[in-house]
Image: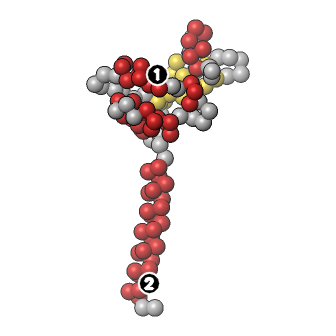
Amino acid sequence: MNLKSIVIVLSVCLNLVFGIVFLNDVKKEGPVEVGLSFKEAVRTENYGSVDRLIAEGRNQHITEDLLIKVNGLMSGGTSYKTYQLLKFDNGEMVLLNLTPNKKFEIQNVVIVPEEQKSIFENE
């Protein structure tokens, strides 16, 4: 093999590797992307596409009637916030407001009041 052939083979291999890495990275959805996808599906009344965003076994809790109600609540502007809930063994909860970028840095810390803890309990 001459040098030109080796360079071409290496170039093709590198392109394949970078293509696979890029494809895997693009497929990963973060919280903001899930929110955007949800909003767009509900806004366009494409409720069937919301199913791919719902956790397995939770479809019965997120009905089409609920999605229709969400559609009625929508307005022109939307902000996206990312949160992480810390639930301790003693029943206390802390909500972290994270930046919506890939770094997910803490912007605020809120101790969840007793009367709002039921919002975060699984049904």
Which quadrant holds residue 78?
Answer: top left
* Label 2 element class: helix
> What residue is disc 2 on?
6
Camera-nearest label, 2 or 1: 1
Query: Of the residues shown, which amino acid type is indicated by label 1?
Result: Asp
Q: Is residue 100 visible?
A: no
Numbered badge on residue 65: 1
Residue found at the far bottom of this picture? 1
Which quadrant holds residue 12?
Answer: bottom left
Q: Coloring scheme of the render?
A: secondary structure
Which mark sits nearer the N-terminus, 2 or 1?
2
Numbered badge on residue 20: none
Query: Would you place residue 56 above or below residue 5 in this image?
Result: above
Relative side of 85 to 5, left or right: right
User: Mark 2 packing: few (<14 Cα in 10 Å), some, or many (20+)?
Assistant: few
* Whether label 2 touches label 1, CB < 8 Å: no
Q: Position of residue 8 (x, y in %)?
A: 40, 80
Front residue of 45/103: it is: 45
Residue found at the far left of this picture? 76
Question: Residue drawn at (58%, 8%), measured in percent from left and top?
Answer: 115
Question: Residue drawn at (47%, 40%), measured in percent from left and top?
Answer: 30
Looking at the rendered structure, the number of numbered marks drawn on it comes to: 2
* Label 1 element class: helix
Relative side of 121 to 71, left or right: right
Query: Of the residues shown, which amino acid type is indicated by label 2?
Result: Ile
Query: Would you place residue 102 above or below residue 11 in this image?
Result: above
Q: CA distance from mark 2 to mark 1?
A: 60 Å
Q: Position of residue 105 (x, y in %)?
A: 47, 34
Question: Residue drawn at (44%, 80%), measured in percent from left and top?
Answer: 9
